[in-house]
Image (cartoon, helix red, strand yellow):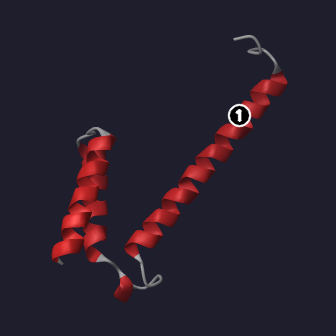
Amino acid sequence: YRYKGLKVVDGALRCMRGTSISLILSASLSLILMSLFPMGISLSGVDWVHFAIFALAFIAMRLFRPNPIVVMLLGGLLGVIGSAFL
């Protein structure tokens, strides 16, 4: 592209990469904490249904490398079913 060799542009893009990664990680951690610990961080307040869904999705992603969209949809479906019946 036109500005490929400019050090200023390369530095700005490098900085934005780190910033975007930290924003994504922060949002992910917030969602995990809100889902697993709805009453605050303690073992007595853990939502074990959502924890099991998270653990299964994490293991499936690491071992089988399925399509992430399919894993998210199945996790959402299991969450709705788990919340309705348990």
Toward the bottom, the furthest residue is 44
When the figure is inspected, residue 47 is found, relative to residue 9, above or below; the finding is: below
Q: Secondary structure at mark 1?
A: helix
State the quadrant of the C terminus.
bottom left
State the quadrant of the N terminus.
top right
Left or right: residue 13 versus residue 64 is right
When the figure is inspected, residue 51 is found, relative to residue 47, above or below; the finding is: above
Amino acid at the residue labelled 1: Arg
Q: Position of residue 70 (x, y in %)?
A: 26, 43
- Image quadrant in which you'd find residue 10: top right
Residue at 24 percent of width and 73 percent of height = 83
Q: Position of residue 22 (x, y in %)?
A: 62, 51
Residue at 52 percent of width and 65 percent of height = 30
Q: Which residue is mark 1?
A: 14
Left or right: residue 67 versus residue 24 is left
Number of numbered labels in the structure image: 1
